[in-house]
Amino acid sequence: MILGVATAMLLLGLTLYRPGAGVALALCLPMIHPGIGADASWLGVAGPGLVLSAAFSRAIVFPGSWEQNTISFVDLSVILWIGFLPVSVMIAESQEFGLMSAVRIVYMSLSFYFTTRLLCYSAGVSEFCRSFMVAMVVFGVFITGLALYLDESASEFVTRLTIGNTYIGLSNYITLALLCSLYVVFYMKATVRGTVRLMALISTPFLFYGMLLCNTRGVVVALVLAILFLLVRSITSRRLSRSIVLRGVVGISIAVVGAIMAAIAFPEAWLRMATKFSDMGDMGGEADIARLDLYSSAISMFSNNPLLGEGVGTFELVNRTYPHNLMLETMADMGLVGLVLIVIVVIGSLLVSIRYQSVNAMFITALLLLQLFESQVSLAFWMNKNLFVFVGMATALHLLHMGPRKPRKEGGKGRRRKRPLSSISNR
């Protein structure tokens, strides 16, 4: 009980004083093994509600949070999509199971989305990004080390510290932490101490090793796509300073070299990952065949009721699992209506974040790309907590640039005269 209360106080304190760190900890809590303390499980459930309460408290303490009163099309799409869930429950095969699924989705999406939106307004996008990226690296190292401590073998390690006793949640978090370490080491030179950057640099090989041990193909491909985006964006951007571009290119190159060195240093883990990719190419793995059956089932359910779907939670009830694809799960359960709304949410936020060429916008887009790809090959819908955090960051970034008032910089301090969009985007 004492450990649970202490962790809850830490979560609230971080959210109030280092907003991004509080959100990073809330994302981490469900992956902490119950063996750490009897209160770990309830705290993982209560975490999103705690950070949302802290976000509202911070918004009240800092009245400037409400100066941006513009509502974006992403906000409207989230609200409409949430509003459609009660209708979807009514047509579900089991209304009781559908209600459980709907409550879980509403709690997850609203908590993380609106928490991020409020905190980005009260602290500023830059401050939120800095604290979030640093905290992701710290907590990523923590849960990786904890997993290795709790399990003596890599084969057992992948079943620990995850959502639903699978390794997907852990591998996703570690890979996000690995991407965040690039931001801390190579893009935060002027905003963090050299010791912090050095610690993040030392942590990078350890995080990469943890990602290899998780043996998940999806996160590897997603990380490659995110790094390729950062590389292309750094080289082609006309609004980033040459020093930032150079640091980015050097950092990404070091990351690639580090991956090759990791393959040499840990041949067994790398060989296991390579074997999993080769199984996918031959379609010989049982998991791949089962995944195709789930895809086929989702398409079949969608064809039965293409407009509204079979009702939220129905796919999981019928198949005893989820389809490992965000869009197919939405199509099967919520039909075209739900699919259109969720596409507007995730693709719309990706498009508005990719529009800007600041360092923060680059990494928000990279995080969105990583999580969006991962959501198409694994994770149930209610597991996509990270996705709603990044959507909230992208929406806040867009509104702070495009709102009718621009009283604050992206960092959230000081009053400025109105500037043209081109100059704002260069920050």
Image (cartoon, rainbow, N blue to C red):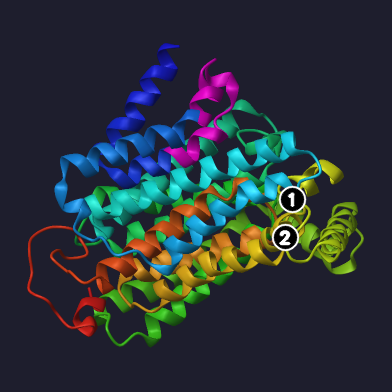
Q: In this view, does 294 lie above or below 29?
A: below
- Contact, mark 2 vs mark 1 (Cβ under 8 Å): yes
Give how far across and how far down residue 143 sits, in percent: 51, 36
Give how far across and how far down residue 338 sits, in percent: 64, 61
In the rendered structure, which amino acid carries the disc numbered 1? Gly
Q: Residue at x 68, y 63 (%)?
A: 327
Distance from disc 2 to disc 1, alpha carbons, whole Å, reads 7 Å
Q: In which quarter of the image is the N terminus?
A: top left
Is 296 on the left or on the right of 338, as rendered? Answer: right
Asked which secondary structure carries label 1, the reply is loop
Q: Which mark is residue 311?
A: 1
Q: Answer few, some or many: residues within 10 Å of disc 1's Cα (few below 14, many 20 plus, some between 14 and 19).
A: many
> Where does the magenta region start and end?
26-45
Residue hosting label 2: 308
**Looking at the image, which is closer to me, 154 or 342?**
342
Residue that extends furthest to the top in the rendered view of this protein: 1
Give how far across and how far down residue 416 sits, in percent: 8, 69
